[in-house]
Amino acid sequence: MEQQPARSEYKKVWSALSTTHDQAKLHVIGVTDEDALRTTGEETVRFLQESVGIRKDDVVLEIGCGIGRVGKVVAPLCRKWIGCDVASNMLSLAAERLRDSPNVELTEISGYDLRGVPDASVDVVYSTVVFMHLEPWDRYNYILEGFRVLRPDGRIYVDNINLCSDGGWNVFETHRAFAPANRPAHMTQNSTPQEIETYLIRAGFKDVQIRTDDDWIRASGVKPELPDK
């Protein structure tokens, strides 16, 4: 039997999970129904508007855009939407989904950084339903990269399931039951609010806000006019 890729081999993992449209949708959000995809995309945009805001003149970049579930809702609200993903299959499906949006740019990334995106070139960076699939070091790497590509006063939003909530703990216990050899490479790994807050502060963001209304951590921050000394 072929050995499955390691969790950190993101390109191999997510290319294998997105060979068909339905398979990609299922692994992105757990459903294949288009109405449900649209509803969850709109819900995410509501959280974005409440935290970082999407303005008509913004250049907005999504880390881990998948099939363009959220991008389809965000793109009409901004000047330019850049969707970054590790899997070329995902980007092909996103291109199909967003074919009527003229302000969309799709970029394949390594899985560890935003190489190729210029410094201080975007206004908003966000990543949703992605950190759960990353190693902690790579979560932080993407926050550092977000800081790099944001203009001064640029905003960042990231989220993950909250280990400290009852629902988050249930997810943890469910996955703990898997035998180590049977744990899928894309298995959800939760965060704590302190983890995400620490990453944002250590990366240099100010005005860091952590929202834990439900079973999710929703975090945002602002890049200072000048980096803190």
Image: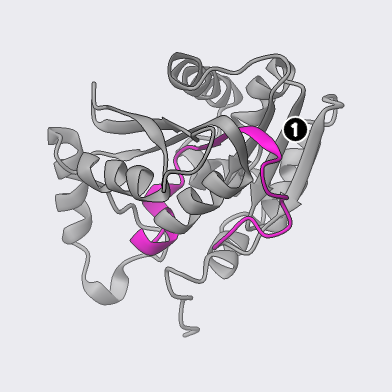
Residue 175 shown in magenta: no
Residue 126 shown in magenta: yes
**In this view, 48 is above or below 229:** above
**In this view, 191 is above or below 180:** above
Which corner quadrant of the image does residue 104 belong to? top right
Whether residue 11 sits left or right of residue 195 in the image: it is: right
State the image coordinates of residue 17 (x, y, percent, origin top left).
Answer: 56, 58
What residue appears at the point 59 percent right and 66 percent down from the top-left corner? 11
Query: Which residue is the site of mark 1?
Result: 97
**In this view, 154 is above or below 89:** above
Whether residue 227 sits left or right of residue 56 in the image: it is: left
State the image coordinates of residue 178 (x, y, percent, origin top left).
Answer: 22, 64
User: For the residue carrying disc 1, how many other residues have a C-alpha within 10 Å: few (<14), some (14-19), or many (20+)?
Assistant: some
Tell which residue pokes out farthest to the front in this image: 229
State the image coordinates of residue 208 (x, y, percent, origin top left).
Answer: 34, 31
State the image coordinates of residue 223 (x, y, percent, origin top left).
Answer: 50, 35
What residue appears at the point 31 percent right and 44 percent down from the top-left corner? 196
Which one is in front, 219 or 123? 123
- Which stretch appears magenta? 112-139
Say which amino acid is labelled 1: Arg
Colour style of the rendered protein structure: one colour
Whether residue 85 sits left or right of residue 198 in the image: it is: right
What residue appears at the point 58 percent right and 69 percent down from the top-left corner? 12
Which corner quadrant of the image does residue 189 belong to? bottom left
Which one is in front, 122 or 169? 122
Q: How many marks?
A: 1
Q: Secondary structure under badge 1?
A: helix
**In this view, 24 is above or below 42:** below
